[in-house]
Amino acid sequence: MALTLNDMNATTLPEVDKLIVDNVYDQSPFFKKLKSMKKVAADGYRFEWVIRSKQQGLADAIDPNAKTEFVSPHTRERAYDVWRYYRGHAMITLEEKALNYGKGQIVNLQIDKAEEMKEDLANKLAADVYTANANGKGLTPLATIIGTTTAYAGWTSTDIPTWASTIDSSTTALEIYGGSTTLTGMRDAAWFGGKKPNFHLTTRELMARYEAKLEPKQRYEGDSKEAGLGFTSLFFYGDPVIGDPFCPSGYWYGLCMDVFELKVHPELNELVSKWIELDQVGQPGSFVRYVSFVGNLKCKDRQPHFVFSALDSTK
């Protein structure tokens, strides 16, 4: 008897589907860090938040006998973005069913397909963290969020002077100490109040170059729990430095992870569908299922980040 749709869904393992939902962020150190900080959160139906555009400036030393004038200056602005939608799918063709005859082999095939579907979505999200998706429909990437003149969440640095990051697009040699175009100089320039870069993402080649410039005693100074994210880590002022294969060539991001969140839709996110028959679309005997993601990145403050974009790993 041919394998039916009910048979396919009956042999789908719920624990495998749960792994898709739980682990789809683990390909990316950026997402995995947010997940470890419990900053992957379901939100309401509108993608909006409030930003501080300036300080009140009301606190001062006083004459104890002087009259206090009560005022309420405008210090907050509405920031906004939009939900982004992703979908991946896995298909079992008639030929694959024939080559994997029997319940046991079909179960194994489904597990493999689920893993493939999870990796496909995870890799796409991990890449879109850095660079805008070519179709213009992906996550708002770091390339947009960490900017000086570019608009993000409806605002530019012309509108709000602190709504800008520290960017270097000309330095080619990675140096740790010295002037304003070194890692230390960029970190200090991005330090804003109590917020500073505390998580560094770069390419594997630039990470190796950074390691070569460290003194032996500096290489592993830091919180070992950070290295427990599962990625190879070095440290810079005690903060993790991770080589991410999805990071674009020449880039080094110094990020303040305290001001980031990954917002996901409470009802539409990470839905793993049941198997669906494809008879009506001209592929009888084949089945398909899909996984979806609805969410976007949110950054509450642009200033405490920096980026190098032209570093040469050979220098």
Image (cartoon, rainbow, N blue to C red):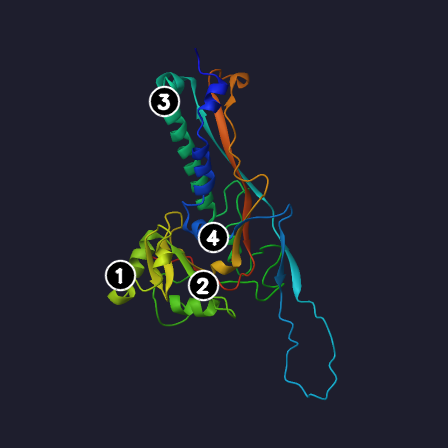
| Residue 266 x, y percent position in the rendering | 59, 43
Upstream in the sequence, badge 2 or badge 1? 2
Q: Which quarter shows the N terminus?
A: top left
Nearest-to-viewer mark from 1 and 3:
3
Q: Which residue is mark 2?
A: 197
Asked if one can make out residue 315 in the rendered structure from this viewpoint, the answer is no
Nearest-to-viewer mark from 4 and 2:
4
User: Badge 2, how many Cα within 10 Å: few under 14, some, many 20+?
Assistant: many
| Secondary structure found at label 3 | helix
Nearest-to-viewer mark from 2 and 1:
2
The circle on residue 212 is: 1
Q: Are marks 3 and 4 in contact (CB under 8 Å)?
A: no
Residue found at the far top of this picture:
1
Residue at image point 47% right, 46% down: 128
User: Badge 3, how many Cα within 10 Å: few under 14, some, many 20+?
Assistant: few
Nearest-to-viewer mark from 1 and 4:
4
Residue type at mark 3? Gly
Residue type at mark 4? Leu
